Image (cartoon, helix red, strand yellow):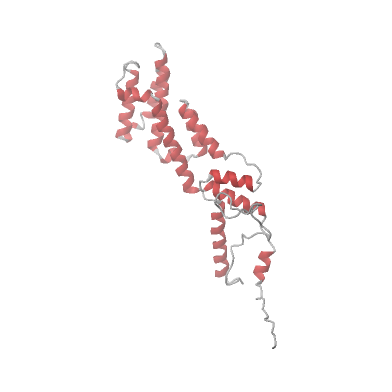
């Protein structure tokens, strides 16, 4: 009986593949991509756990999250001008593209000015009148609801604060602040999600564009190209070998 040894032929590697293999992504870069994806796509708890398991350098709380909290706090405490300024700094286009929200904030600011006027019997109502004249009156004619809201709010200057009809009394309750704060928060999130993607999504799109451009230019490329995020050999999951937070084994 004769035996034969099966020979295997290693396929020739394309020059581009050899060059690509020489450029290994850093493990820390891949971990950062994963963290960015979890954080951007709305999994903050998973992102925090992954950051800890992957031994990522502690990161400061995202600036936009801090700003949103600052804006919410300012509205809930009646500091509407502060909230508007912070909102314009964070997302300048939100109020420009949402006249209804802008009017709601300005009307709430007027309510807060009237609240100050009502705090003392002899308080000067001039600041409230000036604000209504310069900020709200020019906007009111553009929308029937704006006009009704302005008229209802100005009535707070006419009637005693301790003897208001329910629709007027509601303007001075905390619920109005909460409603406006919630609208502002949703507008910020909508604005950010409309223009923000996880970094890895942008990288995949950039890679697809680069490959397509290279092929159209008749560059010498392999027939099939891997994504190229395998990283160094030897990547391993945590010591217990189990997935992290239900994800694939973590690159650590």
- What residue is at 33 percent from the left and 29 percent from the top? 149
* Position of residue 37 measured from the top left corner of the image (x, y, whole percent): 55, 50
Between 39 and 65, the one lying in front of the other is: 39
Between 218 and 170, the one lying in front of the other is: 170
Rendered image quadrant of residue 217: bottom right
* Position of residue 130 measured from the top left corner of the image (x, y, whole percent): 40, 22
- Note whether residue 83 is visible: yes
Residue furthest front as drawn: 1
**Quarter of the image where the N terminus is located:** bottom right
- What residue is at 42 percent from the left and 23 percent from the top? 112
Rendered image quadrant of residue 236: bottom right
- Note whether residue 105 is visible: no
Q: Is residue 173 above or below residue 240?
A: above
* Position of residue 105 measured from the top left corner of the image (x, y, whole percent): 42, 31
Residue furthest bottom as drawn: 1
* Position of residue 209 measured from the top left corner of the image (x, y, whole percent): 54, 62
Q: How many circles with numbers are drawn on the protein?
A: 0
Q: Is residue 225 left or right of residue 160?
A: right
Between 98 and 235, the one lying in front of the other is: 235
- What residue is at 53 percent from the left and 47 percent from the top? 40
Q: Is residue 7 above or below residue 242?
A: below
């Amino acid at each position: 009986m004769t035996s034969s040894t099966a020979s295997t032929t290693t396929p020739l590697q394309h020059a581009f593949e050899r060059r690509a293999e020489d450029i290994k992504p850093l493990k820390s870069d891949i971990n950062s991509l994963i963290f960015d994806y979890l954080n951007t796509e709305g999994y903050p708890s998973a992102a925090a756990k992954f950051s800890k398991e992957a031994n990522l350098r502690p990161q400061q709380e995202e600036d936009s999250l801090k700003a949103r909290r600052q804006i919410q706090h300012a509205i809930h405490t009646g500091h509407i001008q502060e909230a508007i300024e912070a909102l314009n700094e964070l997302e300048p286009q939100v109020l420009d593209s949402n006249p209804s929200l802008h009017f709601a904030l300005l009307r709430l600011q007027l309510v807060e000015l009237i609240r100050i006027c009502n705090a003392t019997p002899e308080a000067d109502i001039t600041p409230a009148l000036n604000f209504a004249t310069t900020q709200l009156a020019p906007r009111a004619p553009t929308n029937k609801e704006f006009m009704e809201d302005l008229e209802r709010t100005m009535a707070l200057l006419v009637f005693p604060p301790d003897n208001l009809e329910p629709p007027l009394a509601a303007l001075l309750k905390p619920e109005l602040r909460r409603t406006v704060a919630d609208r502002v928060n949703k507008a910020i999130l909508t604005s950010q999600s409309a223009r923000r993607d996880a970094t890895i999504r942008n990288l995949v799109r950039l890679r697809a564009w680069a490959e397509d451009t290279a092929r159209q230019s008749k560059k010498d490329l392999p027939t099939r190209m891997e994504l190229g995020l395998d990283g160094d050999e030897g990547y391993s999951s945590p010591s217990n070998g189990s997935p992290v937070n239900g994800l694939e084994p973590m690159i650590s």
